[in-house]
Image (cartoon, rainbow, N blue to C red):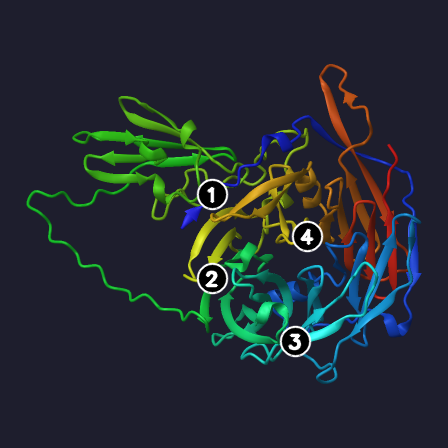
Amino acid sequence: MKLLDLRPDRALLKVDFAGYKLSLEPVPVLRTDLPVSSRPDRVRPGADQYSCLDAQLFGLQNHLVRDPWVVGSCYFLDGGWTVRRVVYDEASGRLKPVSSVFKVGRKRERREGDYNCSMRFLSERYALIGDGQGGLRLVETGDRRRGDEWKGRFVFPAVDGMEEGFVVLDGRFEVASGGERQVHAVCGSVRRTDEDGFETVLHWVKAIQEEGGSGEWKYQSVKVLRGRGFPVYCALELKSRGLVLASDKPFKFVLDSENPIVEKEVVPELKKPEAEGEREPVEMNFEWSQTLEDISVKVPKEEGFSYKVSNENMKLKVHRNEALIIDGESFFAAIDAELTSWTNEQSELQITLFKSQPGVMWPFLFPGCPEETNANRAEGEDLPPVSNLTSQLEECDFGIVGSGEETEYTLERFDATSHAVTHKTFLGGNGPLFSLPLRPEFPPAIALRHDVDACLWLQQPGDEWSLRHEGTLHAFGYVQASKQQRKFLSCSPDLSYALICEAERHIFIYKASYGAEGLRHRNGPQVSIGQQKLVSLEGSGEIIGLCAENDCAILLTESHVLVLQLRIEE
């Protein structure tokens, strides 16, 4: 397994960004009332769907699905299971009449325990639709720019574990080297475990079409992953050779119909006989402490022992005689080995390590090491200041508090063939902020907090899986942390603005560029400043969907479609 070091591109950061200035200029809002027959389909959790995982799966679902291939176009399913098309015409600045493009067949009437309908676009002509009752359909959309009628092409058969319903989390359309067409879909659901708990179950299903695209589609295989956490980010990689998950609990493969999982036999380790004169393993005797940027380690010297520090192959190792007491290969996360330094004094060794991903507090240095010396900080102790804002970090900046346990998120890549985690990175107590389809045919981009900013990362093509820093929402990681009522977060594809959407009424808009001229402190250099706007919606009901475009943001409520016209003339 490779520990991934997500190091932002400094050229995409703005160290002179000084925050956002509130603008009182009104934002034009277009409102379209939806007839009762065309209102969105909405399912509430059933009596048995009361877990935190159920709340996340239902509450975080965006019912307005953006089409990455057609600007200003998005879709939702109404109560009659008809796919409705919403189009904002940039040329006229008007919303076109909401139209229907496809009728999803019902298996039965809605009942308690069903999930909401869900949809994902795979290519310019294909999409996946889940009905929330265990049905998954592949549809051919035709030319979506013209609003062609959609046609059903394939219905996935009932797979064990999926018949009770699910939500489509991601999907991809691939063309193999031999011309075979493939459709991959990842569907998520929450199930009760034998221990009277709950877990998230991910079904990765695959269908193929042979004969150069002229034959019939047929079901091929299913893979199943289970975990106690919620996949905040779930995306198939390019070529569908792996699955990328971000969660607060680990996942693992439990089934693969195409490539059976072989459980590795655990062989008990035999204790080697002690050689004559061999010393007993020595107890680790050192202290360590940390800040958001670095780690300090102090190793007191004892008489009769020799100490050696090495940094070969960028891996720190500390030996006391022949015993290894600090092993850099087992650190909680990556460090910047080039900046590692140490001093060898008469009474102790002093080692300074710099975190490759600053802003994250490590719960431990490596497994089995002594506890951090200042881990139990006194209440009310001053929090470290933000590096490029004058304000201090707030309590909400440090993830979930008061839950009784530390919440640590990880981002992992699961290989489809070996079923192992091949790449992993630690995200700390703050999980991904949001994800969005930034570019057509690419997996969704993921927004991660870096210091006060939010950096967007995109999976890259190539033999070696990797993420690339595509852009930055300046200070957005900081401002969103204080919005406790936030429901949806998003940004425009060109990253010109970001949105924080509450469940009802309030929309916060953050535009990184306030104008052509920067501001200058009285006794300091020129700084950049952004613009914040607040939109208050009255009488529209709960917001259940959001689609952000470069010039507008489209909102879906239980009875309306609203368009925020965000074009700000420079």
Q: Which dot, 3 or 2, sits closer to the camera?
A: 3
At a point 87% along the width and 67% down the height, the residue shown is: 99
> Are discs 3 and 2 less than 8 Å apart at CB?
no
At a point 63% along the width and 40% down the height, the residue shown is: 470
Distance Cα–Cα, label 2 vs label 1? 30 Å
Q: In which quarter of the image is the C terminus?
A: top right
Residue 134's disc number: none
Which circle's residue, 4 or 1, is located before the other in the chain?
1
At a point 88% along the width and 64% down the height, the residue shown is: 98
Q: Which dot, 2 or 4, sits closer to the camera?
A: 4
Which circle's residue, 4 or 3, is located before the other in the chain?
3
Q: Is mark 1 on a helix, strand or loop?
A: loop
Which kind of residue does numbered mark 4 sit on? Answer: Pro
Q: Residue 476: horizontal and vertical position, in percent? A: 69, 40
- In the rendered image, the vertical position of residue 126 relative to residue 371, given as above or below: below
Residue 440's disc number: 4
Which circle's residue, 1 or 3, is located before the other in the chain?
3
Label 3 sits on residue:
154
Q: Nearer the viewer, residue 473 or 91?
A: 91
Distance Cα–Cα, label 4 vs label 3? 23 Å
Label 1 sits on residue:
362
> Are discs 2 and 4 less than 8 Å apart at CB?
no
Distance Cα–Cα, label 2 vs label 4? 23 Å
Distance Cα–Cα, label 4 vs label 1? 36 Å
Which kind of residue does numbered mark 1 sit on? Answer: Trp
Which circle's residue, 2 or 4, is located before the other in the chain?
2
What residue occupies the far top of the structure in this picture? 523
Q: Residue 206: horizontal and vertical position, in percent? A: 55, 70
Which kind of residue does numbered mark 3 sit on? Answer: Phe
Crowd tier of the residue under label 3, counting other residues whose Cα lies within 10 Å: few below 14, some 14–19, many 20 or above = some
Distance Cα–Cα, label 3 vs label 2? 24 Å
